[in-house]
Image (cartoon, rainbow, N blue to C red):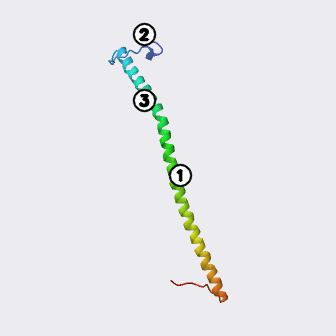
Amino acid sequence: MVMGKYPEKGFVRTTPYPCNGMLYSIWKNAVMRCLWQETMAQRRNPYAILNMRDIMEQEMVLANQQLLTVRQAALSQLFEKEHRQYQQELNQMGKSFYVERL
């Protein structure tokens, strides 16, 4: 071991590591596992997209129904408010609505 200007070049590793063949097999198994998971994700992906599209369509239908309900409620409140205002204006002029009692 030659010690020169840069001592790290002459550094020798003293900690024991498994042999290179074992490290290579571990690495190769990890790569194969990642590739397998990647292909599985690609195969599942179209089904997941279709499922998400169906869920989004169902949510849009429900959201549109809720929006319709909210708009109907707001419109009925507006009509009631206008009716009360019209009735107050007629009362101020001395006129009234004909109300049929059941």
- Front position among marks 2 and 1: 1
Q: Helix, strand or loop at disc 1? A: helix
Q: Which mark is residue 60?
A: 1
Residue at screen point 52% across, 55% down: 63
Q: Amino acid at mark 2?
A: Val
Q: Mark 3 is on which residue type?
A: Gln
Measure the alpha-carbon separation of dots 3 and 1: 33 Å
Q: Secondary structure at mark 2?
A: loop
Q: Which of the two residues, 30 or 20, is positioned nearer the viewer here?
A: 30
Q: Which mark is residue 25?
A: none
In the figure, 68 relative to 102: above or below? Answer: above
Residue 2, disc: 2
Residue at (62, 79) in percent of width and height: 85
Q: Are marks 3 and 2 in contact (CB under 8 Å)?
A: no
Q: Earlier in the sequence, mark 2 or mark 1?
A: 2
Are circles 2 and 1 on residues that touch, CB within 8 Å? no
The N terminus lies in which quarter of the figure? top left
Under mark 1, the amino acid is Met
The residue indicated by pointer 3 is: 37
What element does badge 3 sit on? helix
